[in-house]
Image: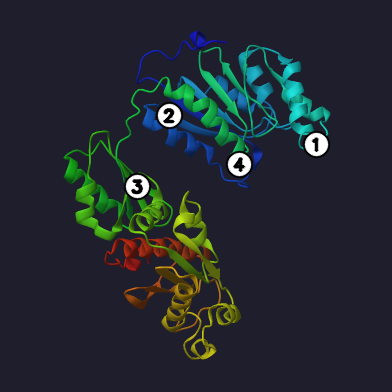
Amino acid sequence: MTDANENKISQPGQIRVGVIAVGDEILEGRIQECHGRTISNLLTPLGFEVAWHLSVGDTPGALASALKSPPAATEVIIISGGLGPTADDRTRQEIADAVGVPLEEDPDCWQRIRTYLEDRGVSPSSNNRNQAFRPKGSDWLENDQGSAPGLKTVLPGGETTFALPGVPVEFNAMVQSHLLPWARARAVDDTEGEILEFIAVPESKLDEWVVEQMGRADLHHICVKGTTQIEVRLPAGVSLHEAASRQYRSRFSGCGGIGTEGHLVEAARSSGQSVALAESCTGGMISTKITDVPGSSEIFLGGWNCYSNSMKVTELSVDPSRIDDFGAVSGEVVEAMALAARDRSGADVALSVSGVAGPSGGTHECPVGTVWMGLASAAGIRSHRYQWKGNRQRVRELATQYALHVLLATLRGQEIHRWSNLES
């Protein structure tokens, strides 16, 4: 198959994309589909229009029907999932049915699969052999991370389809090695516009501000990410970085779409500062966010996950009388935790957090949703109390995001903005 057969892709600016996720586990809510977001984030800046996302189950005919009658016309369809060795992995057969061709076994592919499995101490089964079949006329997409090769097929209507494994590590690797090189060769504009990131600014207010700055309401996109982060994507050639910094100060994280944690690592690296943590109610969530960032080992020294009172005493030397007198969720305790984390790690800045995430454990004086944070730095020790509403996960996520905000503002020498009322 050659690109000459991709007859629907003609003029720049007309490449529309559809994304299909395959699997009963997605429809039943057992796993969250995330590959569509990856595709949109990667292809949109290249000038592709992602027209729709669709999920289908493993029922025979479901995928073939979607390929024959998609929600809207597209030139490219990207499929994830259904390429495994089991009976319910039907993507190969479904594509063949949509094209109207038989499946054909490729002996060379079967040998590669056998070698891949045997090198890892796995005996190939007859099920594994299913992965060596492809629709007649389809091209293989090599998979270095697993046994299931991908497929590139042109449908009768001219749509180019990429079928990739649903396993995240395999999917992401094949996007980088196969899909992106293909897409970049057809990119309309690979100059990405500015991406501004804010923390807990009301979406409506932010939209009004952007429109005021740009003079138009149809050139930007606002996306709420997680519990507190808001992202604004601007067209190429437009910059509002300096204006955002003046207007929103510490509530403006920065540019680039790297998240508060990414800006935190950059700020610590550029200022030559290091960070340590002492977590209780967040149970390591803050540490995870920071260490998800490549290069975080340069600035993050480590942390303590002291969930119980006894661990606060034994690991951070919190005076038991402080816990008895003020409670584990108090300014006195988080200040002691932050100071100990800074002293023991040698970090420039240490943050601590303790709270009542719920659903039980609250009191009249310290209800569910109460979170105390402590901060120890060269400027001294301080603590703040915040009160949030929501379920256990929301309280923990808010605490995590705000902790990252506090650290980022501290590393930049900015005043810490208290936005708990916006999240109440």
Of pointers 1 and 2, the one earlier in the residue sequence: 2
Of pointers 3 and 1, the one earlier in the residue sequence: 1
The residue closer to the viewer here, 283 or 96, is 283
Q: CA distance from mark 4 to mark 2?
A: 20 Å
**Residue designated by label 3:** 231
Q: In the structure shown, which secondary structural element does the residue marked by tag 2 occupy?
A: strand
Q: How many marks?
A: 4
Q: Residues within 10 Å of mark 4 (few under 14, many from 20)?
A: some
Of pointers 4 and 3, the one earlier in the residue sequence: 4
**Residue designated by label 4:** 26
* Position of residue 275 in the picture relative to residue 26 (left or right): left
**Residue designated by label 2:** 51
Amino acid type, mark 1: Val
Amino acid type, mark 3: Glu
The answer to whether marks 2 and 3 mark residues whose Cβ atoms lie closer than 8 Å is no
Of pointers 1 and 4, the one earlier in the residue sequence: 4
Of pointers 4 and 2, the one earlier in the residue sequence: 4
Q: In the structure shown, which secondary structural element does the residue marked by tag 4 occupy?
A: helix
**Residue designated by label 1:** 122
The answer to whether marks 3 and 1 mark residues whose Cβ atoms lie closer than 8 Å is no
* Position of residue 257 in the picture relative to residue 236 (left or right): right
The residue closer to the viewer here, 400 or 230, is 400
Res. 204 mark:
none
Say whether residue 71 is visible: no
